[in-house]
Amino acid sequence: MARRLGYDMGFRDSSDIMREMARVAPVFSGLSHERLEREGGLQWPVPSGSSPGTPILYADGFPRGG
């Protein structure tokens, strides 16, 4: 979308974008196109390569800002 709007961010494809997200945001660090193709769907967040994902994100209640 950025490229279509005239701003080329240097990403070749969605795999590049996913790698960048995993690099800068720990909640994405366990995700990659390769892993999704190999293991199927994963429930976000996936904080590491060994994490199976998070089937119930707010099992103990919804956090509230303070």
Image (spheres, rainbow, N blue to C red):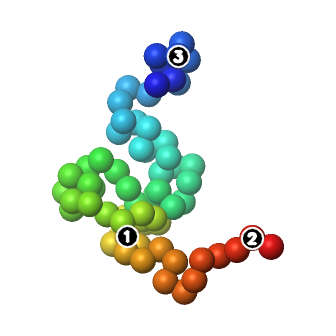
From the image, tell me which residue sits under label 1.
Answer: 53
Question: For the residues marked 3 and 2, what is the alpha-carbon distance in whole angstroms?
Answer: 35 Å
Label 2 is placed on what type of residue?
A: Gly
Q: Quadrant of residue 61?
A: bottom right
Locate residue 24, reporting x and y percent. Answer: 57, 49
Depth check: give the residue in front, 24 or 41.
41
> Who's the residue at 47% across and 51% down the image?
22
The reply to whether residue 51 is visible in this rendering is no
Residue at 48% of width from left, 18% of height from top?
3
Residue 64 as seen in the image, left or right of residue 5: right
Q: Between residue 58 and residue 29, name the one nearer to us.
A: 58
Q: Are marks 3 and 1 in contact (CB under 8 Å)?
A: no
Tell me if 48 is positioned left or right of 25 in this view.
left
Report the residue marked by disc 3: 5
Q: Which of the numbered marks, if any, corresponds to residue 65?
A: 2
Element assignment for label 3 = loop
Name the outermost residue toward the top: 6
Q: Residue at x 34, y 51 (%)?
A: 32
Confirm whether residue 33 shows in the render. yes
Query: What x and y, as percent, mark residue 12?
Result: 38, 26
Q: Position of residue 18 (x, y in %)?
A: 42, 44
Q: Say whether disc 1 or disc 2 marks the residue closer to the N-terminus.
A: 1
Q: Residues within 10 Å of mark 1 (few under 14, many from 20)?
A: some
